[in-house]
Image: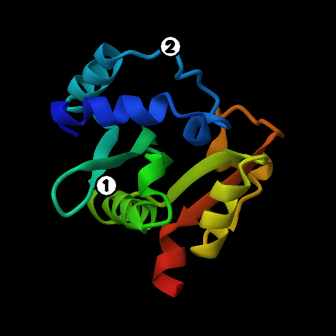
Amino acid sequence: LKQKDAPLMLEWMHDDNVVHYMGTDFSKKKLENCQKFIAESQVDFPNIHRAIVDDEDVYMGTVSLKNIDTKRRTAEFAITIRKTAMGKDYSKFGMSEIIRIGFEELNLETIYWYVSKKNTRAIRFYEKNGYKESNVASRELYEGVRQRPEYKWFAIQRSDLLHG
């Protein structure tokens, strides 16, 4: 992420088509909030936040691994993409790259995420790309992660890629 990405980051934050089903109210965010997030992302160890960009280095979205647990070797995945970038494989690329980083560079075993059950566009994207729903309520792996029945949970294991 670079400071030049802040205005386009703010764009998706103020686009209800993008943030409608997210658990955070982004409507009150200002350019300064984006600039602060970008600056903090450079030192937010062990979390990783990366820009998804086009061939001309124009910001299309953000992909992250957060809540990294080095003992359990797990991380929570997050992604957001500008409306203009939807349907153009930016999400697919960003997601596959951050998962690669998680497994190959951070030596994680499991990457998990959740999405509102009402967010059918995101669910279709995950399922179309082969990601499977996870029953996190029964897994010790997600201890400390607040269970929310209004969300659909997904997870990918390192072994999924090896046996893929």
Indicate the secondary structure of the residue bearing disc 1: loop
| Residue 121 in view in this figure | yes
Q: Residue at x 27, y 30 (%)?
A: 6
Q: Amino acid at mark 1?
A: Leu
Foreground of the two, 69 or 51 = 51
Dot 2 corresponds to which residue?
A: 28
- Please state if 42 lies on the left or on the right of 160 as rendered: left
**Quadrant of the image containing the N terminus:** top left
Q: Residue at x 66, y 38 (%)?
A: 143
Q: Amino acid at mark 2?
A: Lys
- Please state if 150 lies on the left or on the right of 157 as rendered: right
Relative to 7, say whether 66 is above or below: below
Label 1 near label 2: C-beta < 8 Å?
no
Callout 2 crowding tier (Cα within 10 Å): few <14, some 14–19, many ≥20: few
Spatial separation of the CA atoms under disc 2 and disc 1: 34 Å
Image quadrant where residue 97 sits: bottom left
Image quadrant where residue 148 sits: top right
Dot 1 corresponds to which residue?
A: 106
Percent across and percent down for residue 57 are: 17, 53
Q: Residue at x 52, y 34 (%)?
A: 15
Residue 139: image tag? none
Percent across and percent down for residue 99 are: 40, 62
Percent across and percent down for residue 82 are: 43, 46
Foreground of the two, 54 or 100 = 54
Relative to 22, say whether 154 is above or below: below
Foreground of the two, 150 or 31 = 31
Relative to 9, say whether 119 is above or below: below
Q: Mark 2 or mark 1: which is in front? A: 2
